[in-house]
């Protein structure tokens, strides 16, 4: 038996006849401790009857609004915007239904429809949001059980996409970038920072003396210190400070994302590079580090990955690189010292 807090509310958590029971008590820990003590006594004296009120009916539309209010407070603005767009689709799908009426069958029906014409990864992202919504409904006492539990599974066939540029491809793209875009693209490849982090970077977070860039608003909402290489340091030292933002337009504001998007894709078209996004510059940073011999654990820290499994996708790289790597066996098997692999310098 235990008491725990989620958000502002306290809950009691215990088992009765093999069934896990969680009760929402309210904002008082003291009351939760009183309830758990009472439940212990009732179960010991065989007086606990497990009488729980049925949650009051609530429309999916209304509960979705409650969930989005929670998301707006507890999640990044970009995450909230994405979830708001997804939730509009769910609102149409479950229009007029109470959340208590929605079953796993309804969710499977939705999943089958979305599967037609949409990538598995897209459907899975939307399903993850729906699962979390119903989890919160249970946690907040609006449902006894979630209809999107273990029986509703994510689609298979989702692979981790890793698209990156080799140094010669990067130089080609850079040559075809407009002047304002070149430092942004160079910065992305040499730091591994996300587009939003780059465009929102302020000079006050750049320490040229120590060679450190500090990011406070990362995807994981944690502080991250990014070391500069000589390419980045020299570029920043030579840039005028016409705004509080490092990469600012003539209006002293960050460049709009769509401006970056269209300009970057014009450079890709000129370079005849296909199937590539701005975010893939981050993959280019990590992939070339791995190919240069940097250990995955260090790449994990530089990328800000919480789990090494996220970094493992860079372990399997270009076949040409792998074929080149096994040539060290010539030296090993002939008892000659292997040749050292050359370090990839993206700025050359």
Image (spheres, grey):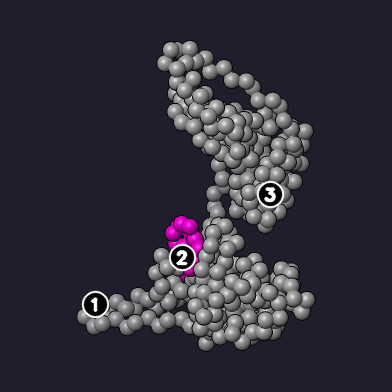
Residue wearing tag 1? 333
- Give neighbour class at mark 2: few <14, some 14-19, many 20+ (Cα, 10 Å): some
Measured as percent of width and height from the top left, residue 303 is found at: 50, 66
- Disc 2 or disc 1, which is closer to the eye? 2
The circle drawn on residue 301 is 2
- Give neighbour class at mark 3: few <14, some 14-19, many 20+ (Cα, 10 Å): some
Which residue is located at x 59 percent, y 79 percent?
A: 186
Callout 2 touching callout 1 (CB < 8 Å): no
Secondary structure, mark 1, is helix
Q: Nearer the viewer, residue 191 or 214?
A: 214
**Spatial distance from mark 3 to mark 1, Cα to Cα?**
60 Å
N-terminal of the two: label 3 or label 2? 3
Q: Nearer the viewer, residue 232 or 210?
A: 210
* In the rendered image, the vertical position of residue 300 relative to residue 153, given as above or below: below
Q: Give the residues in magenta.
A: 300-317
Q: Is residue 281 left or right of residue 330?
A: right
Secondary structure, mark 3, is helix
Say which quarter of the image contains residue 247.
bottom right
């Amino acid at each position: 038996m235990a008491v725990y807090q989620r958000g502002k509310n306290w809950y009691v958590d215990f088992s009765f006849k093999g069934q896990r029971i969680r009760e929402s008590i309210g904002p008082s820990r003291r009351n939760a401790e009183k309830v758990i003590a009472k439940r212990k006594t009732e179960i010991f004296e065989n007086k606990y009857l497990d009488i729980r009120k049925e949650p009051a009916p609530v429309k999916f539309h209304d509960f979705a609004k409650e969930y989005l209010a929670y998301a707006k407070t507890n999640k990044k603005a970009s995450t909230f915007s994405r979830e708001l767009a997804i939730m509009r689709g769910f609102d149409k799908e479950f229009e007029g239904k109470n959340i208590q009426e929605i079953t796993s069958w309804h969710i499977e029906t939705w999943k089958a429809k979305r599967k037609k014409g949409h990538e598995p990864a897209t459907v899975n992202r939307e399903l993850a949001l729906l699962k979390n919504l119903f989890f919160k409904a249970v946690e907040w006492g609006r449902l006894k059980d979630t209809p999107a539990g273990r029986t509703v599974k994510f689609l298979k066939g989702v692979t981790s996409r890793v698209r990156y540029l080799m140094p010669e491809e990067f130089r080609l793209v850079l040559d075809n970038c407009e002047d304002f875009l070149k430092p942004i693209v160079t910065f992305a490849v040499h730091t591994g920072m996300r587009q939003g982090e780059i465009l929102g970077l302020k000079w006050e977070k750049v320490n040229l003396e120590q060679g450190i860039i500090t990011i406070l608003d990362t995807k994981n909402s944690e502080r991250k210190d990014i070391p500069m290489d000589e390419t980045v340091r020299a570029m920043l030292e030579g840039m005028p400070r016409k705004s509080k933002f490092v990469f600012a337009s003539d209006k002293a504001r960050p460049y709009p994302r769509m401006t970056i998007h269209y300009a970057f894709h014009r450079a890709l078209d000129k370079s005849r590079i296909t199937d590539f996004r701005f975010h893939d510059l981050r993959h280019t940073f990590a992939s070339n580090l791995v190919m240069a011999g940097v250990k995955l654990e260090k790449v994990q820290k530089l990328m800000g990955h919480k789990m090494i499994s996220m970094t493992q996708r860079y372990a399997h790289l270009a076949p040409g690189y792998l074929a080149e790597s096994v040539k060290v066996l010539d030296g090993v098997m002939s008892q000659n010292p292997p040749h050292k692999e050359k370090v990839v310098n993206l700025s050359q």
